[in-house]
């Protein structure tokens, strides 16, 4: 099911966002956080897998760099305790603002342009095919 949802890409994120504040327990345990995840946290993790989040912007916290904290997964799971502390409401609002921001749309347009341009270059001319 996860692969199926991920195949929809960013089109599935608005649906996932409706579940971010779902506090019902799941059967999934986070070894990293040492607690059982709720359904909202699973939706948050899935959204991060689909479209990497700017963690500081959506949580207000900047995690360690991987070179400084070698055991850090450095993904949204690292921030779930902080998201729980504010009951997820602040995260939900900040994520919604970021996801629907014009800035993100501009970045996606740039990326699409780069990908389209890259695809126009003949394979034999690419340095890193």
Image (cartoon, grey):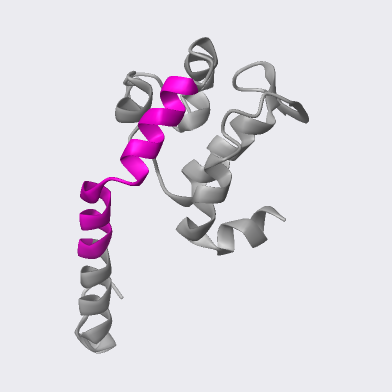
Q: Quadrant of the C terminus?
A: bottom left
Q: Is residue 50 visible?
A: yes
Q: Quadrant of the N terminus?
A: bottom right
Q: Residue at x 60, y 22 (%)?
A: 32
**Secondary structure that dominates the magenta span:** helix
Q: Nearer the viewer, residue 56 or 20?
A: 20
Q: Residue at x 68, y 26 (%)?
A: 38
Which residue extends farthest right? 27
Q: Residue at x 46, y 24 (%)?
A: 72
The reply to whether the magenta stretch includes residue 109 is: yes
Q: Nearer the viewer, residue 72 or 77?
A: 77
Give how far across and how far down residue 115 sits, in percent.
27, 72
Figure check: 4 above or below 118: above
Picture quadrant where residue 65 is located: top left
Region in magenta: 89-110
Give how far across and how far down residue 127 sits, in percent.
21, 74
Picture quadrant where residue 59 is located: top left
Q: Is residue 30 visible?
A: no
Q: Nearer the viewer, residue 2 or 10?
A: 10
Figure check: 25 above or below 105: above
**How many numbered dots are placed on residues in this image?**
0
Picture quadrant where residue 36 is located: top right
Figure check: 122 above or below 127: below
Q: Nearer the viewer, residue 67 or 10?
A: 10
Give how far across and how far down residue 50 sits, in percent.
48, 51
The reply to whether the magenta stretch includes residue 88 is: no
């Amino acid at each position: 099911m996860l692969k199926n949802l991920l195949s929809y890409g960013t089109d599935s994120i608005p649906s996932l966002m409706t579940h971010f504040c779902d506090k019902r327990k799941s059967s999934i345990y986070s070894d990293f956080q040492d607690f059982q995840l709720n359904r909202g946290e699973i939706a948050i993790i899935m959204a991060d897998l689909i479209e990497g989040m700017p963690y500081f912007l959506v949580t207000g916290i900047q995690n360690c760099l991987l070179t400084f904290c070698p055991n850090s997964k450095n993904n949204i799971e690292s921030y779930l305790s902080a998201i729980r502390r504010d009951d997820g409401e602040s995260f939900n609002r900040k994520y919604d603002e970021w996801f629907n921001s014009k800035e993100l749309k501009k970045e996606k347009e740039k990326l699409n342009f780069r990908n389209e341009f890259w695809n126009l270059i003949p394979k034999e001319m690419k340095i890193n095919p």
